[in-house]
Image (cartoon, rainbow, N blue to C red):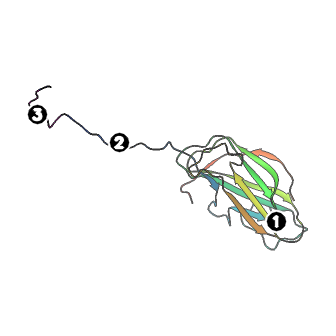
Amino acid sequence: MVTESSETDNSYTKNITVSAPSQPNLSPYLPTGWSDKIVVSKVTGTTADSSPLYTTDTLYVDWAVVNNGNGAAGSFYVYLYVDGAYKTFWNIASLNANTFVPENDYSIGSLSAGNHTITITADATGVVTETWLRRLGRRFRGGWGVIATRGSKTPKPISGCE
């Protein structure tokens, strides 16, 4: 046994906080001035939905994906579906936190009469570990086939996320 002058100062406690690493969160996004997260129009150069849509119309799709997480996302794919059928993809090389990437005027051709769904899925192959650990899709229901092409998109900075 050791004899000390004071037994009251033998211990010290420090509280610490351990946080999860910064992670991205990829989601369809509604940029300022757009009518929806997926826009379907009869003309190029607009970000507003057209109505009505006819079987004789060539239709164009605009979409955007945001990283509203607090970490950068590495390379990922965005898939486009029409009526649940895969049509094409885009490879996004990277997307910093609080930035979005848009696609404008992608031609999906014309569609038969009736209701149709247009879906985009960010991180469709599941390679990005996200804050919410899920990939989100957005559907547009309206009345519209698709020409499949590929492209690479350039991210845009945003001032705030939705």
**Type of amino acid under label 1:** Lys
The boundaries of the magenta stretch are 3-9
Q: Label 3 crowding class (10 Å Cα cut-off): few <14, some 14-19, many 20+?
A: few
Q: Are marks 3 and 1 in contact (CB under 8 Å)?
A: no
Which is more toward the observer, 118 or 33?
Answer: 118
Residue 122 point in image, percent of width and height: 68, 51
Q: Label 2 crowding class (10 Å Cα cut-off): few <14, some 14-19, many 20+?
A: few
Q: Secondary structure at mark 3?
A: loop
Give the left or right position of residue 143, taking residue 120 as reference: right
Q: Name the residue rendered at 59%, 48% in the picture.
A: 130
Q: Name the residue rendered at 82%, 65% in the picture.
A: 42
Which is more toward the observer, 47 or 100?
Answer: 100
Q: Name the residue rendered at 82%, 62% in the picture.
A: 83
Q: Are marks 3 and 2 in contact (CB under 8 Å)?
A: no
For marks 3 and 1, give the one nearer the viewer.
Answer: 3
| Residue ID for mark 3 | 6
